[in-house]
Image (tube, helix red, strand yellow):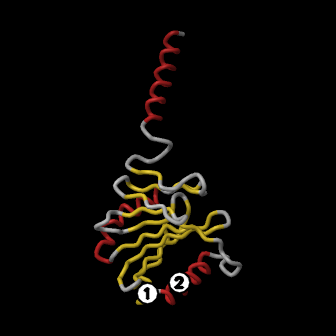
Amino acid sequence: MKKLICVLLAVVCCLGFASCAKDNGVPDGYQLISDDKVAYCFYAPTQWTKNNVGGAYSVYYSTADPSVVMVTFYTPSSDEATLDDFWATVEAQYKHQYTNYELVSDEMTMLGDRNARAFTFTAGISGSDYKILQIVTGYGDYYYTMTYMSTPEKFDSHLEAVKGMASVFKFK
């Protein structure tokens, strides 16, 4: 009986130490960017700077390299019932709003545990050129987007970090 109690105490202690390794479920090396007001958990590497302004949850890499990742959600209109319909509407807006818009790729991916589409495109915005990755998925009554925007020169240098953000993203 004493051995059983000792084994159980050892297991409880190990579980207690293991639960302290992570702070509220935040993956190691990441920080929580979103709050309890939204239906998701957006995590970013700790070396990125939190910049939640105007209701959008976002991070940027540095003041010298303002590459940014943000998460937003949209209520689809009745003619945007599918992700293809939603993207067609968004892409039409981008073609009108930005100069030199060009879709580079359209691939299947994941946002957390949800199937998603990853649209990579280039565009001129306010006189500067950017390369943008927009990951889009549906959840509940909304479309959620994780958007990564950077200069074409810096885009690839942060791509793995952005893919990591997408992989640890969680819907509640």
**In the rendered image, which quarter is residue 138 located in?**
bottom right
What residue lies at 34% left-to-right and 68% top-to-bottom? 66
Residue 101's label in the rendered image is 1
The answer to which of marks 1 and 2 sits earlier in the sequence is 2
**Number of disc labels:** 2
Distance from disc 1 to disc 2, alpha carbons, whole Å, reads 9 Å
Figure quadrant of the N terminus: top right
Question: Residue visible at 41% across and 89% down?
Answer: 100
Residue 116, percent from left and from top: 53, 68
Q: Residues within 10 Å of mark 1 (few under 14, many from 20)?
A: some
Q: Secondary structure at mark 1?
A: strand
Q: Is residue 169 found left or right of 82 in the rendered image? A: left
Instruction: Give 162 or 49, whichever is nearer the viewer.
Output: 49
Q: Amino acid at mark 2?
A: Glu
Residue at far right of view = 78
- Please rate how many residues cluster around mark 2, counting C-alpha atoms within 10 Å: few if below 14, some from 14 to 19, many from 20: some
Residue 91, labelled with which disc? 2
| Label 1 close to label 2 by CB (< 8 Å) | yes
Residue under the image location 32 percent in, 63 percent down: 62
User: Residue 133's spot in the image, x, y percent?
Assistant: 43, 73
Q: Is residue 25 above or below residue 75?
A: above
